[in-house]
Image (cartoon, rainbow, N blue to C red):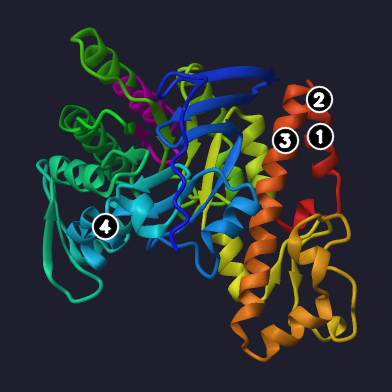
Amino acid sequence: MAIYRASVLKTMALFDFTLEKTSGSARAGRFATAHGEVQTPLFMPVGTHATVKGVLPDQLHELDAQVILANTYHLFLRPGTDVVEAAGGLHRFMNWDGPILTDSGGFQIFSLADTLTLDDDGVAFRSIYDGSKQRWTPEDNMDIQQRLGADIVMQLDQCAPYPATREFVERAMELSAHWAKRCLVAHTRSDQALFGIVQGGMHLDLRLESVKCLREIGEESAAAGHKDFAGFGIGGYSVGEEHDIMFETLGQVAASLPATKPRYLMGVGNPTTLLRAVRDGVDMFDCVLPTRTARMGTAFSSTGRMNIRNAQYTRDFSPLDEQCSCPVCAHYSRAYIRHLVKSNEMLGGILLSLHNLFFLLDLMRRAREAILAGSFEAFYQDWMNSPARDDY
């Protein structure tokens, strides 16, 4: 039986971002979507194929997940936009009644550089499933995402790899800005928030130029009586560089974005990195890390990463993390989960996925509470001085 429960937004206008409190540069806010109001800072579990691997929608609710991310590239190719649209959109298709964000799929396309042809108008690529030839313009991408029906959608952009020449990165930034304008014109669905994406690699001047372009595009659109970007993604980080390199520019990039709109650092899920980015003024995050590492037998904990396959856990009947209040730690032991993982039982990966997701969701919840209390810096320093800090 379907458990779809459409929520009703009552307290805020659609796409309003309310900044409730700051603590240094860290921000606590609320963002209104068509499927409910979300509280920031937040982590979004990734459901690439319209499913968070091994985790039921009800379990995600129990973990207090607020937004689920799905991927336009993969859903366009399989099962196809028409199938999801015929089902009533992503919410009904995947039986998730909360907010959904769809990435444009640009990262996936440009990560397969040997299979694509790029020009100013769009990009041609081959399906990873059957090798079929496909082509997207920014207008095509907006049409697909509008038909999929997520609450938050991302512009089509070109994500430069690392390392790359400055010339390549600058061209990708300029093309992404050009496409952002076309996406804003093409996007007409009134119950969806469209985010622009900041590019520019590790070059601060290019990053700030990207922000300037996006702000001007949105302001010109709003002045003409059309929509502005509802928020901004910060893309092109965590693409192979050391995270310390990212933090050389991230704070200045975040500060250059409008204070009245959410800031989303794309593709980051390391606990220490999340807290460092919150401290720099970022509001939203997503990553496959908690579920992917879970399927490999890794558990997050307050003392660092645990490889549950290790023999030391064979007779360890304590929970994964003594400080964790998730359902897994309440009911299952390290010994049992190790047994499942070593026996290749799927339940092992499921339990570790639930635990790891809770760990990041709860970390963001506690960061938010610290911001609201005006004590985020102390919270941050406690983490940075903890045994876990260097293990992430």
User: What amino acid does circle 3 point to?
Assistant: Ala
Where does the image place residue 51, in percent across and percent down from the top left?
44, 62
In the image, taking residue 100 as reference, residue 146 lies left or right, namely left
Q: Is residue 211 magenta?
A: yes
Quadrant where the C terminus sits is bottom right
Mark toward the start of the polypeptide (2 vs 3): 3
Upstream in sequence: badge 1 or badge 4? 4
Q: Does the magenta portion include 170?
A: no
In what element is the residue under mark 4?
loop
Q: Which residue is mark 1?
A: 379
Residue hosting label 3:
367
Q: Position of residue 122 (x, y in %)?
A: 13, 46
Q: Quadrant of residue 27?
A: top right
Q: What's the amino acid at mark 1? A: Phe
Q: Nearer the viewer, mark 1 or mark 4?
A: 4
Please tell me which of labels 4 and 2 falls first in the chain.
Answer: 4
- Residue 135 image point, x, y percent: 11, 55
- Does residue 185 appear anywhere in the picture? yes
Which quadrant would residue 207 be assigned to in this image? top left
Q: Amino acid at mark 4?
A: Ala
Q: Are marks 2 and 1 in contact (CB under 8 Å)?
A: yes
**Which is closer to the viewer, label 4 or label 2?**
4
Name the residue beneath numbered marker 2.
375
Whether residue 331 sits left or right of residue 289 in the image: it is right
Real-space Cα separation, disc 1 to disc 3, in angstroms: 7 Å
Q: Marks 3 and 1: in contact by CB < 8 Å?
A: yes
Q: Which residue is mark 4?
A: 87
